[in-house]
Image (cartoon, coloured by chain):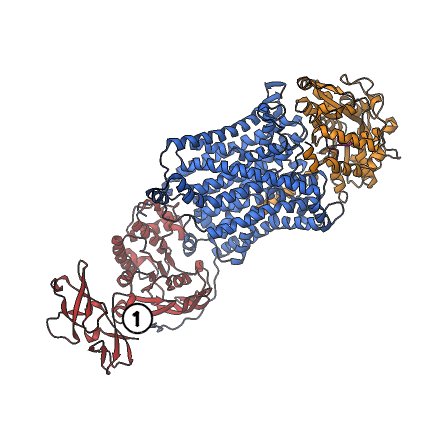
Amino acid sequence: MNPAIATALTNPGAPMKVRGVQKRFGAFTALDNVSLDVAAGELVCLLGPSGCGKTTLLRCIAGLEKQDSGELYLGDRDVSHLAPQARDYGILFQSYALFPNLTVEANIAYGLAGSGRDEVRQRVGQMLELVGLTGSEKKYPGQLSGGQQQRVALARALAPAPSLLLLDEPMSALDARVREHLCTELRQLQRNLGITTLMVTHNQDEAMLMADRIAVMNNGRVEQYATPQEIYNRPATPFVAEFVGQGNWLPFQRSSDTHAQVGGMNLRLSDGSIQRASGRLFCRPEAINVNPPVHEENLFPAKVREITFLGNRCRMSFELDQLPGHALLAELAPEAMPRLGAQQIMVALPPRSLQVFA
Amino acid sequence: MFKPLALAAAVLATFSLNAFAAKTELTVYTALEAEQLKSYKEAFEKANPDVEIKWVRDSTGIITAKLLAEKARPQADAVWGLAASSLAILDQQGMLQSYAPKDLGKIGANYRDAANPPAWVGMDVWAATICFNTVEAEKQGLTKPVSWQDLTKPEYKGKIVMPNPASSGTGFLDVSAWLQTFGEKQGWAYMDGLHQNIGQYVHSGSKPCKLAAAGEFPIGISFEYPAVQLKRQGAPLDIILPKEGLGWEIEATAVIKGTPHEEAAKKLADFSASAEAMDLYKENFAVLAQPGIAKPQTELPADYERRLIKNDFAWASKNRDEILTEWRKRYDGKSEKVAAK
Amino acid sequence: MNSNLALPLPHKQVRQSSKAEIGDRIFVVGGKVLLLLLLGVAVLLPLLAIFWRGFSSEAGQGGGWVAAKELVTSENFHWLLGNSLKVSISVAAIVVPLAYLFAYALQRTLIPAKGIWRGISLLPLMAPSMLPGIALVYLFGNQGMLRGLLSDNIYGFWGIVLGEVIYTFPHALMILLSALSLADARLFDAASSMGASPAKAFRSITWPATRQAVFAAFCLVFTLTITDFGVPVVVGGDYQVLALEAYKAVVGQQQFGRGALIGMVLLLPALFSFGVDAWLRRRHGDSMSGRAQVFKPAPSKLRDGCYLAIVLLISAALILVFGMAVFSSLVKFWPYNLSLSLNHYQFNETAGGGWLAYSNSLKMALGTALIGSVLIFTGAYLMEKTRSQRGLNLALRMLSFVPMAVPGLVLGLGYVFFFNLTGNPLHVLYGTMTLLIVCTIAHYLTTAQMTATTALRQLDAEFEAAALSLKAPLYRHYLRVTVPICFPALLDIVRYLFVSAMTTVSAAIFLYSPDTILAAVAVLNMDDAGNVGGAAAMSSLILFTSAGVSLLLAWASRGLLRRSQAWRQTAPGH
């Protein structure tokens, strides 16, 4: 993809606003008072499990569904009640929806009606160069690979220079190997173009890889809307904590302002004073120190249950001696793996890695 | 999207046919045999170049029913070639325009409506005839019938076809003749016996003869026109005129009351009664409305006209509905009939 | 919730409609409203007219509640009804097993030359229902070639049954073919690995999957037979049936009320079978899983031999019948002069309608095929791909299914009653070619539309959304993308409508005028007048025209598919 062309090609992205969007299908609430702001040029991912409302929200923004109430703004235009043709966006569908009986050139030129033939040809050429498919003008979509089709679909969506780009699970039709490569490329392209982009996905890896900000959705609500780092390190709700990455849950009783009782253990927390009388502590597996060389806080004995080799790291399933029956996970580099046969280990739970939840 | 245009175009076309034609188009209802339509039309149009005939042809019963159904909004301008008993019914309903054609004086008194001016004027006569297939008769060992009563003989079981009087004028004239010849009670008894031998009732008057000619059924009760035509074409037919006498019917012409083309319709009535038209009719029929023109048909005996029974048309048309109802009740679709076969 | 509401809310702007939007509104909403009006006039109002006619007690019409009661309790009616039922049930009981065997042979065995057998099985579709009747007379009538084979008369019950068996065979076959084509190889593999015999496999796998289709075929054949009068007119003799009675009441005696009442009775079997079929379909659900594998029958000489014999027998019977009809049209004077001549084809010399009837039929068939396919396909597109007018869509969908439940005879009656109403401004259309075309399109609407919908459903559901996002108007998208992709299905619909229009008689018989007489009606008239040779000739002409056009369209479709092969193949690994 050619960055030099990219900047010259499209309009600067416009900011997008969603205000209080409500949508029901019969008795089922798909979107429950959703509000969102996307800054110009930002790539925001809507992340969540099936049925959480992310695709519905995307389709409402596209005008393919009509929201029951709420407003949508693109730039400074109120597009809440406009037909899809009157809004200004490009969309890439999961199935790409390329027109099989038209050549690549004709597909890309589809939204360019009203321009002279030379202008159109020039534009198509630019778009093809942008996505790295120069020379494919006369081919038909059926003759291209999945990744190539995606690029053509992208070129087609971007050709009319919209101020918003919508992506509906763009990677789900691709092989895992191709996926990561295309994620990076797509991200690069979007950055160069500076086009405001909203992407729907259920795959957290994609979201983490590509997004400026992620909106984690569940049951029609946005549970957390923040950067990937914040989402990962400081999940706002148990759902977000569990959905993104792996996690450990430890039931606790408040023993003091700074300490929580977990099973037979008293852990120090660093999150300020503990408000709840009881609840759960959340801890990422990679934050746990196994057999630390120096003494650390919250160090407790544990038994190894199982170790799974994952290539670049290992996942260890263990049980704290003083919290039997609770399987917990830790992640280690292969070198740090306890020697086979060593069942008894020491585990440290750093205070800043423990988060309090209900 | 193109449908409204096509619709409009089609409607315009059907209208424009009338608007742009220099000729007057005359809608003429008829029960004439289809083979006769072309020559009659050509002859009339030659004599009257400013009129064009549009035929609406069907069998007698159907045409009569159609005319009656259209009583409130007649579609026909004139009728050329329909049974007089049917025309009498139309007259009773007040649907005919009385008119005396130019050559009325030459028409025989029996062959026109008695009123002055007449509601209908005759063209020719057609009479009952039996078509008997000699080849099939020999194959099946059948004796040749000479009278109507002969047809009830058990050897003919399933071998006779005759027209349904409800739809065919020929059929009706047969039934009317039997009722008049044998008296009402005996007449129905005769038809009961005949019914046992009937293989099929058909809808047109000429079909029984065609079936007989093709050997499908050896005996067909029909009328003389198809019998003569088929025999000329080489069919192995014997033309039998039963000795009790032949039922007959007058084929006639009338003008429909209230027609917008009254002038042209009257021209048609004039032509139908003229000597020129009689010349046409004589090719097909032995007895014409104008006496003295007819030429004998070689296939028919010379005393053909004398074999016609005395026919009371007034009685026939007055009782037509009742006769048909009774006939239907007895022979058209009762369960006993299936069992009898 | 961590939403960032830092940016101030902008003020709202006035809505702007683009030209494309207006064009689309006309296309979508205007198109649907137009179709709704057309369907209302062409389908709904005529049906309502039947009910009105049947129950209005205008004098001389034979209608009204009293007449209805009289009719239903009359002995004559019971006799007619009994005849109709006997015939229809017999026909269905004969045709469905035969069609099942034939379909099984084509789908589940390895007999050779399947294309030929399939082609032969389509013969009865190419000609009006009178043709088998005429052929039967020439074969088994009193002067028939094979008279000796039959102990009794062909005229009557057996004539009607045989004629209808031939006429309805392809219809039953089509349903069973499509049911037997859905075979999941995995089920059969599982059965054989569990040691099930072929008979058991049939009972436990094939039969349950095709049971519903057998019932549907039975109902269809029953309905087609009970409402057909083409065969009874030619070969029924004095064995009368309800359909014929309706014809006689309306055409013969102009008793519209009586005709309407009989029409309503004939509507019942169709409605019943339609309802039961819909209910069964909902209970049965989807028959094929998305991951089913295509079934390839295992070779078996014995099985193939048996089925080949069956198929040969049936095909031979069909060829005999249709060959006889064509042959008899060439015979100078049956049975006494068997020299060949074309004089039966000189239609203008004889009664019935002449060459005008044939040219009218061509015109009507072309009109029906071309106008009908455009209307139906576009209508299907609007219903399938534009979901925003829910009320309109629902109404259209419901109305589109009505013709399937209404036999041609009843629809024709409805048209007579509706367009003959004295107060009706559309009365001017009565007897015109336009009305014939509209009636025929309405009659064959549902099947054509299902073909269209099936083809449209294979398109990506997001095409329209993509086009809208690119600000391309839907009507342009329809013409540029949808129609070219679906062109083979469109040709299929054209063929179906053309052949149906050439061969239809049940509705046309009531709606023609002397100017617009049709070939199939001419066949009836000629047979009525005793000109059986001419009737055979005109029927043969219809047969050749339908077959010829079908072959032409099939060839065109194949050529088209070959030329568009470049983009019709799917991507590798996609």
Tell me the kind of residue under disc 1.
Pro
In the image shown, does C539 or C309 lie closer to the viewer? Answer: C309
Q: Nearer the viewer, residue A124 or C468?
A: C468
In the rendered image, residue B60, in percent from the top left (x then y), is placed at 75, 33
Residue B228 seen in the figure: yes
Image position of B291 (left or right of C71): right
Q: Which residue is mark 1?
A: A238
Query: Residue C128, can we see it?
Result: no
Chain letter of the red region: A
Q: Quadrant of the N terminus of chain A?
A: bottom left
Q: Which residues are magenta?
A: B164-173
- Pick the front one: B18 or B220: B220
Colour chosen for chain C: blue
Residue under the point 60% across and 48% down: C43
Q: Colour of chain B?
A: orange
Q: Chain of mark 1?
A: A
Residue ID at (14%, 61%): A334
Q: Residue at x 24, y 82 (%)?
A: A255
Disc 1 crowd rating (10 Å Cα; few below 14, some 14-19, many 20+) is some
Instruction: Report x, y in % for residue A81.
Output: 46, 64
Q: Is residue C571 above or below residue C471?
A: above
In the rendered image, residue C413, in percent from the top left (x then y), is placed at: 65, 44
Label 1 residue SS: helix
Among the 4 quarters of the image, the one containing residue B178? top right
| A201 relative to A236, above or below | above
Q: Quadrant of residue C297?
A: top left
Asked which quadrant contains residue C219, the reply is top right
